[in-house]
Structures are given as structure tokens and as C-alpha cells.
Image: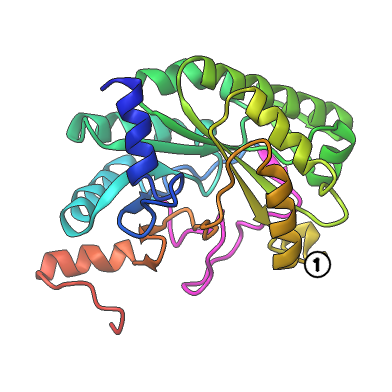
Amino acid sequence: MKKQSLEEGVINTHPCFSERGHERYGRLHLPVAPVCNISCNYCNRNYDCVNESRPGVSSRIITPLEALKRVLVATERDRISVIGVAGPGDPLANESTFNFFKLVRKEFPNIFLCLSTNGLLLPKKVEVLQDLGIFTVTVTINAINPSTAEKIYAWILYDGKLMKGREASEYLLENQWNGLEMLTDRGFCVKVNSVLIPGVNEREIENIAERARRLKAKVMNIIPLIPNGKMINLQKPSCQVLEDIRKVCEKHIRQIRHCRQCRADAFGSLEEDKDIELELINNALAFDYCESV
């Protein structure tokens, strides 16, 4: 498929990239990636509840073969346009991610494959992603300056070395921005996610937007902090503050406003999340999905 037609497909049908497609098409996130190689101070992956919707949460970890089974069921029972891996750890830090994508690409040669990452391993993995036929990648970048990143990340683990403080921040930011440039140079469609953390990085969000545009990212998603982990006592930014920053950043790069801060096992449209485990049961019993069950 030509790059132009791929980009048109993303614009029309990818619910996480497209205002146009998020109500009509669904996504399926498969939680095959448990290991994470950085520690974000706003993240807590230690617990889950069925009513909780936030990144890093999943009801269980599944194997690549179990994930493929869920893809087969989901694509039969819903208008799924995108198959993605978004955690609950970092997909690039888990070999199971690549094993899963190989299985899916063999069964579904024309479906969009998508991945979300913190970017630490991007420079090492861009060619692997290209070989797997992945076209859309989301990179979470929360800072421009290492001094700001130090307040957001507790540590990183790279090539078996644990890094903290300024060393960790400089290494992470360098890999994130270099990885983003490598992706766009190779024709990937890239979205930049940035968590808006009041009192920490709000003064750098516009700079992130401007640099992302220069490096040819297609879209930006500014996400309000969900107070958690070491940042549980911080305030979530108001809707007005969030919109004001989006308007400023919109001068540089298109903004996403329909994000639902999905779980790592999200399924269905952004307007109607479903339970893939319940779908498996219903499929075996030949039932339709019912929210009242």
C-alpha cells in the first residue's frame, strides 16, 4: 500500500489519530508487554479495577497466541480498524510485542498495526517496526529540558544499566527525539503524547509541539495528568487550562481532543468501550455484547 493511501486511511479510520474515525471505528489494545524500562512518577501499574480507565492498566497479561485469538474474535464482532500494543509496560522492551505483531501481520496483512512507546528504545527498534509493517507510532514526550524530565522520571533501564537523575533524563530525551526523527524519516505516521503536569512541565508543552512539528510528527495529544504514583498529590489541570494550551500548540501541530486515555486492554470505539474477555465468552456462546451483563 502506498504511503499516501496509508495516511488517508489513518485520517479516515484510525480512532486514536482521527476525529473523523473515532466514532465509527474501533481499536483493540493487547496487553502483551508487561515489562517497563522507565519509571514515570505519575504512573502506577500495581492495581486494576474494571471501572478504572487510564494508561498502564490491564486486567491481565496475555501471550501473543492468546492475543491473536482475541484479534480473531474482535474483528468478527466489531469494526476494528487498528490493532495496537500500548502496554501495560513499554512495548519495545518486550520481545512478546514483536512476536505478537508477526502473528497478526500474517493473519491480517491489511489491518493497521499501532504501537505506543516511551521512546527509550526507538533508535534501536525503528527498523524492526518497519519490517513488521507498523505504520502508526505514538511517542510520549513530556519535556524539552533534562532538568524538567528529572522531576517526571525516577529512573531508566538501558542496556542493563540503571540510570537516575540528570544522566537518565538526558539519555531518555536524546533517544526520544532521535527516535522520533528516525521514524518520520522512514515514513511512519507519528503522534506525540505529552502529559500536562501543572507546576512541572506546562511551560515546555508548546516547545514540545514546535519541535515535534519540525521533526514532522503528524499530530499531538496533550493529556491531562491523572494524579497517581509519586504525583498523587498534584492537581489535575482544569479543562480550561488544557484547552488553552491546546490552542497555543495548535499553531504548530494539529491537536487531538477526543482522547479517552485508554487502558492497555482497551477494545471497541472510543465512545463505547467493551470487555474483550466477555466478548470471548459471548463469541463461544454465540451471544451479542450486552452492557447489562
Is residue 261 rendered to the left or right of residue 76? right
* Residue 270 position by quadrant: bottom left
Q: Quadrant of residue 275?
A: bottom left
For the N terminus, the quadrant is: top left
Q: Mostly what secondary structure, the magenta segment?
A: loop
Residue 104 image point, x, y percent: 26, 35
Tell me the residue at 46%/72% (across/down): 50
Q: Can residue 146 be seen in this view?
A: yes
- The residue sitting at 43% across, 49% down in the picture is 31
Relative image position of residue 200 (x, y in whole percent): 86, 50
Is residue 100 visible in this depiction of the protein? no
In reply to whether residue 39 is colored magenta, the answer given is yes
**Residue 252 percent across, percent down from the top left:** 67, 35
Quadrant (top left/top right/bottom left/bottom right) for the C terminus: bottom left
Residue at left offset 55%, top offset 41%: 35
User: How many numbered marks are there?
Assistant: 1
Left or right of 292 in this view: 241 = right
Up-down relation of residue 17 to residue 25 (above or below): above
Among all residues in the image, which is located at the extreme front? 251
Q: Is residue 202 above or below residue 146?
A: below
Q: Which colour scheme is used?
A: rainbow
Element type at mark 1: loop
Disc 1 marks a residue whose amino acid type is Gln
Q: What residue lies at 39% left-to-right and 40% top-to-bottom?
A: 11
Q: Magenta stretch? A: 38-61
On whether residue 143 falls in the magenta region, the answer is no
Q: Please state the horizontal and vertical placement of residue 75, each as a whole percent of the image.
A: 21, 51
- Residue under circle 1? 235
Given residues 98 and 183, the one toward you in this image is 183
**Residue 215 shown left or right of residue 201 in the figure:** left
The quarter holding residue 59 reads bottom left
